[in-house]
């Protein structure tokens, strides 16, 4: 009994997909482009260290402002929902498909904890918009 590997989307969220370098985060916030799609402000920047030959996965940063949710027990479930939603839908903008790798920051902007289904729907819309933006940049 043998199993063949197929090109199935990977639904894991590995450490290499997390944006943690302070230098890169600073560059993303200084040079990155952004758009707003409720409840997210999305910042993005093409990964300058990657060429089309050695593509790496997109790296994301999820932030929920302390100003809106004072307690960590309120912020952390929202961050978990956003990361889980991204994990399940990241195949929509795979680096192979876009021929580039992105740094992405999701900033949660509302002061209410939204249900997972709504976060998932909105995050999917942001991924589709990112795909359109990257494809427009390639066309130019």
Image (spheres, helix red, strand yellow):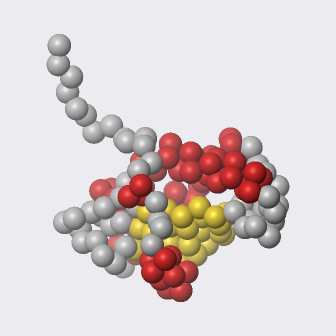
- Percent from the top left, x then y, of residue 90? 46, 50
Q: In this rendering, is residue 67 above or below 117? A: below
Task: Identify which residue is drawn at 56% across, 45% down.
Answer: 84
* Left or right of 13, for residue 86: right
Q: Residue furthest top?
A: 1
* Viewer-side residue, 25 vs 89: 25
5 and 80: which is toward the camera: 80
* Residue 37 placement, left or right of 6: right
Where does the N terminus fall, quadrant-wise? top left
Q: Residue furthest front?
A: 72
Q: In this figure, what is the number of numbered marks?
A: 0
Residue at 76% from the left image edge and 67% from the top image edge: 66
Q: Is residue 127 above or below residue 139?
A: above
Residue 75 in view here? yes
Residue drawn at (24%, 72%) of the image:
51
Residue 94 percent across, percent down from the top left: 37, 54
Residue 130 visible in this rendered orientation of the protein: no
For residue 136, what is the image quadrant? bottom left
């Amino acid at each position: 009994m043998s199993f063949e590997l197929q090109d199935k989307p990977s639904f894991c969220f590995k450490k290499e997909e997390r944006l943690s370098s302070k230098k890169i985060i600073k560059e993303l916030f200084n040079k990155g482009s952004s758009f707003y799609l409720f409840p997210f402000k999305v910042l993005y920047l093409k990964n300058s260290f990657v060429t089309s030959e050695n593509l790496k996965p997109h790296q994301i940063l999820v932030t929920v402002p302390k100003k809106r949710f004072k307690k960590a027990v309120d912020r952390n479930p929202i961050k978990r929902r956003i990361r889980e939603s991204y994990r399940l839908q990241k195949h929509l903008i795979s680096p192979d498909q876009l021929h580039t790798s992105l740094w992405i920051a999701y900033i949660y902007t509302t002061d209410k904890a939204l249900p997972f289904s709504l976060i998932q729907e909105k995050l999917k819309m942001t991924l589709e918009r990112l795909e359109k933006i990257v494809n427009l940049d390639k066309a130019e």
